[in-house]
Amino acid sequence: MERPVDLPSRLVELLEHAVRASDPEVALHSLSALRRELDAFERVQAWRALDAGSSYGAVARALGISRQAAHRRYRDLAAATEPPPGAREPARLRVAPEARAAVQLASEEAAALGATRMGSEHLLLGILRAGDPVAAAALRSAGVTLENARMAAQPTLAGEEDVGDRASKVTAYARRVFTDALREAAASPAHVIGVGDLLRSALSDPAGGACRTLEALGVEASAVRAAL
């Protein structure tokens, strides 16, 4: 049985491609992709450390950067996953480090694709980059890779973008995804919003960008949800 390609194994795969490539341009392409994936892996590990109680200073020392730089880089993950105004957050509810990283990476994917706001299609890309061993593996088992999802990303419908706060960097539909994930996590004794919660919510509406991206790839959203 083929082992799912999670983020650590993808790092090894890209490094092997770079080292073994006979064509220098192929090697450079692999190294460029490796740098992006290393950055994603670093964020996940930094947030795991912070979530476990490490200070920004400790994370900064481990990375060889200043405390201020570490704080600037990782504090944004908390803001990116805060519930929308008016949402009622249960006591002790928290967002898993991997989910925080996936949301920040989704924001970067939106910017790289020239989108003015982050939609659920970008969240799909962020989940793939964060390399969650369950949610990302469910996507990859269905044949969805970061590369083909980027090429097939179908933007959230224009009508959804016009709803809500026009100054927001997140579409109204993506905000609904976060709210639904919060509600689902609240029903769990653990009270943790995980990557799987985000993906299930992102794939709940056939008209959303995430579902439309999977449709463009010939993948059934219901099959991915069932695999979570």
Image (tube, rainbow, N blue to C red):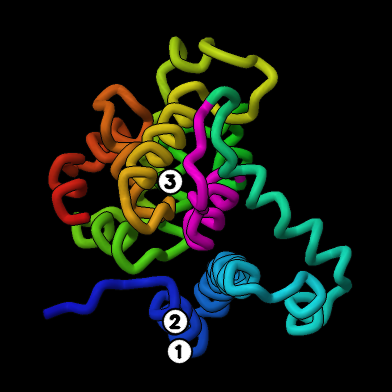
Q: Residues within 10 Å of mark 3 (few under 14, many from 20)?
A: some
**Residue at far bottom of view:** 20
* Residue under pointer 2: 17
Q: Which three-letter amino acid code belongs to the residue tagged 3?
A: Arg
**Residue carrying label 1:** 20
Q: Earlier in the sequence, mark 1 or mark 3?
A: 1
Total numbered circles: 3
Res. 25 in view: no
Magenta residues span 87-107
Q: Residue furthest front?
A: 91
Q: Secondary structure at mark 3?
A: helix
Look at the numbered discs 1 and 2 and tell me whether their residues touch, using CB distance below 8 Å.
yes
The residue under the point 39% across, 64% down is 132
Residue drawn at 52 percent across, 73 percent down: 30
The amino acid on which the numbered mark 2 sits, given as a three-letter code, is His
Inter-mark Cα distance, 1 to 3: 26 Å
Answer whether residue 11 is visible to the viewer in this image. Answer: yes
**Foreground residue, 103 or 189?**
189
What is the distance, in whole Å, between disc 1 and disc 2 at their CAs? 5 Å
Q: Residue at x 24, y 58 (%)?
A: 138
Q: Nearer the viewer, mark 3 or mark 2?
A: 3
Q: Mark 3 sits on what residue?
A: 150
Q: Please, what secondary structure does the residue beneath circle 2 have?
A: helix
Secondary structure beneath dot 1 equals: helix
Along the viewing direction, whichever of 91 and 192 lies nearer the viewer: 91
Image quarter where the C terminus lies is bottom left
